[in-house]
Amino acid sequence: AAAVIVVNNTRDLDSDRKVGKNTLAVRIGLGWSRAEYAALLGAPFFLLPLLGCLLSAGAAIWLPLLAAPWAVLLVRRFCVEAPGVGYNRLLAQTAQLQLLFAVLLGVGLIL
């Protein structure tokens, strides 16, 4: 969910900077905001093995990995597109990725 806020704040980076609004994106800049986004999207996937061990879950715990290629595409887009109105779709797709991951994880935990 924090990744959605990163996209939103990065989208508004220039206008926020002009009016003196000190969002994290304004404070750390575009490059670090991109790194933050990549880390936030990657973390749930990298934490799956730990979750699987803690819960003694079966192989179905890996179901969320089906969403990993989409996460990679979103990170690439975030890193190559200039902040602005084009980020609106990226914002929505980041929220959709979160929902997909949650559904796949839920199904994996039930199985």
Image (cartoon, rainbow, N blue to C red):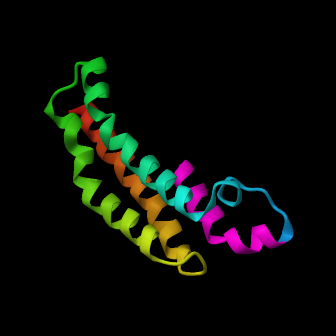
101 horizontally vs 108: left or right: right
Asked if residue 7 is among those painted magenta in the image, a careful observer would answer: yes
Which residue shows up at 28% across the image and 55% down it?
67
Whole-percent x and y of residue 3? 52, 53
Which residue shows up at 54% across the image and 74% down it?
87
Q: Which residues are magenta?
A: 1-18
Which of 70 and 111 lies nearest the eye of the viewer?
A: 70
Asked if residue 82 is among those painted magenta in the image, a careful observer would answer: no
Residue that lies at the very extreme toward the right in this rendered image: 19
Prevailing secondary structure of the magenta residues? helix
53 horizontally vs 99: left or right: left
Q: Quadrant of residue 70?
A: bottom left
Residue that lies at the very extreme toward the bottom in this rendered image: 85
Q: Quadrant of residue 97?
A: bottom left
Whole-percent x and y of residue 56? 23, 18
19 horizontally vs 69: left or right: right
Which residue shows up at 78% across the image and 56% down it?
22
Whole-percent x and y of residue 101? 35, 49
